[in-house]
Amino acid sequence: MHFRGNETETQSENQQKIMLGIAAAATAAVAIVAAPVVLGVVGFTSTGIASGSIAASMMSSAAVANGGGVAAGSLVALLQSVGALGLSVGTKVVLGIGGALVSTIFAR
């Protein structure tokens, strides 16, 4: 089969769109899987904040800044909740969309 001018460009553009879609889906999947792993590495674990970790330093700074306790709804509190309970479906959707958008932006 022979392609002329525009048909060849259209096929090439379609292939690029397919590859972009695959890259976006892969990036989204990595973002969803990596988030809990990264939280665990920095010290936000299912059993609490790990002693001597980056999370412990963040918690200490947050407590000092807040007069002795970590404020509900703060970044440290949010990350600890995610570390303890995992990601909600809504959060996974947001991470997936964010990962796909980042992939799309960098692919252009």
Image (cartoon, rainbow, N blue to C red):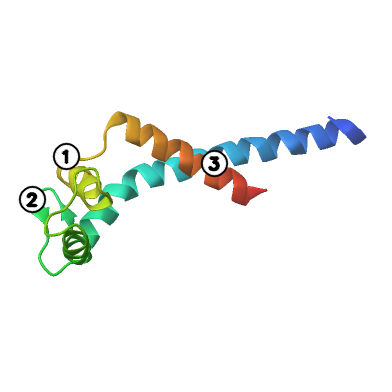
Q: Which residue is mark 3?
A: 101
Horizontally, residue 2 falls left or right of residue 83, namely: right
Q: Are marks 3 and 1 in contact (CB under 8 Å)?
A: no
Compare marks 3 and 2 and give the one earlier in the sequence.
Answer: 2
Q: Is residue 89 above or below residue 105?
A: above
In three-dimensional space, the C-alpha distance between marks 1 and 2, rounded to whole angstroms, equals 10 Å
In three-dimensional space, the C-alpha distance between marks 3 and 2, rounded to whole angstroms, equals 33 Å
Residue at (61, 47) in percent of width and height: 105
Q: Is residue 105 visible?
A: yes
Image coordinates of residue 92 in percent, x first then y, are: 34, 35
Residue closer to the observer: 54 or 13: 54
Mark 2 Cα-neighbour bin, 10 Å: few <14, some 14–19, many ≥20: few
Please tell me in which quadrant of the rendered image residue 55 appears.
bottom left
Q: Amino acid at mark 1?
A: Leu
Q: Which residue is mark 1?
A: 85
Which secondary structure, mark 1? helix
Q: Which residue is mark 2?
A: 47
